[in-house]
Amino acid sequence: MRVFITRPLPGDAVAMLEATLAARPEARSNWSIGSNPEDRALTPEALRRAVAGMHGVLSTPRDRIDAAVLDAAGPQLRIVSNYATGVDNIDLDRCRQRGILVGHTPDAVTEPTADIAWLLLLGAARRASEGDALVRGGNWTGVSPHELLGRRLVGRTLLVVGAGRIGAAVARRAVGWRMRILYAARRAHPEFEAPPLAATRVELDDGLRQADAVTLHTPLTAETHHLIDARRLALMKPSAVLVNTARGPIVDEAALVQALRSHQILAAGLDVFEEEPRVHPGLRELPNVFLLPHLGSATVEDRTWMTEMAVENLVAGLFGEPVPNEATAGR
């Protein structure tokens, strides 16, 4: 069996895989583990060369696993284990057609990403980045009654777009702020509507009109690309805050820049971007947007847990066992 790991991962995926295989008598010979030793994404050409002849690939979101990569790997490829909860970097339909399993790491990203969503929400609503710049620039002259007035969140209305694990975790945190919780999803989620969340399901457009804060937690699909566009931004309150910790292309960044410039909405908090790592230059210039470099799951504990899950998925797929976290369409 031959395996390739596309990038160094927290907790050392190579060591974890070697330890897991060593514990299996049937895996003590005829194994080859290759890896990219550099902490940067491989070029498409290098990735295709690296996966040739592999039975398993442990990928990251920066690796586009498309038909060309699957062709380069060859018909013996059994599993692609993705180090992420999202799988928009993987052609799931092609994998399914070829009988290739796909794993992902959903649970490990839930709580840290919900924390980052709240960090962005609080930071954007309370103008934290502007305050930080004021202090660091040596321009703060002391407390002023009118300086950097933000908006309170206690008792306001939160719209959660996407009712999965992370959306639910964000909503749970909103209970402490005594917020009224709305959610937009393709189907009803009784766990959202039951106490303590007591959330109300709404159509997206109606929820955008009502919400003081909007947080995005839907997967990136053809249907959700530019889900938040100029028309939908225009539905939001001028005092509202938009947060995105899901995938960058869910928001039309050009439309968002215009909405922020014209104060059509109050502020935004973004951890993801349309063309990562490129950030729309208009966003970098605006004071009313709080920007983070895709830190959603970035804790030592949770990124290491992601590595453990990715290795578990990989090994299960290689041995023909049920993949603990198999990705399916719509995630």
Image (cartoon, grey):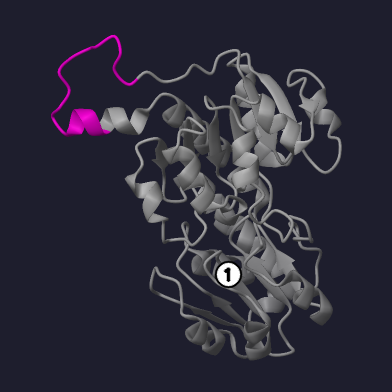
Above-or-below relation of 254 to 312:
above
- Quadrant of the frame with the C terminus: bottom right
Give the residues in magenta.
Answer: 133-148
Q: What is the quadrant of residue 176 in the picture? A: top right
Q: As shown in the figure, which amino acid type bears the numbered disc 1?
A: Ser
Which residue is drawn at the image coordinates 62% and 83% (left, top)?
69
Name the residue carrying label 1. Answer: 59
**Residue 30, visible in the rendered structure:** no
Q: Is residue 28 left or right of residue 92?
A: left
Q: Identify whether 256 is placed above or below 326.
A: above
Q: Quadrant of residue 93?
A: bottom right
In this view of the protein, can residue 10 be seen by the observer?
yes
Quadrant where the N terminus sits is bottom right
Give percent across and percent down for residue 251. 58, 50
The magenta stretch spans residue 141: yes
| Between 206 and 197, the one nearer to me in the picture | 206
Q: At 80% from the left edge and 73% from the top edge, which residue is drawn? A: 320
Q: Is residue 29 left or right of residue 98?
A: left
Residue 301 shown in magenta? no
| Drawn side of residue 203 relative to residue 9, left or right | right
Between residue 300 and residue 319, name the one nearer to us. Answer: 300
Where residue 115 appears, x then y in whole percent? Answer: 52, 34
Q: Secondary structure at mark 1?
A: strand
Q: Position of residue 111 (x, y in %)?
A: 59, 37
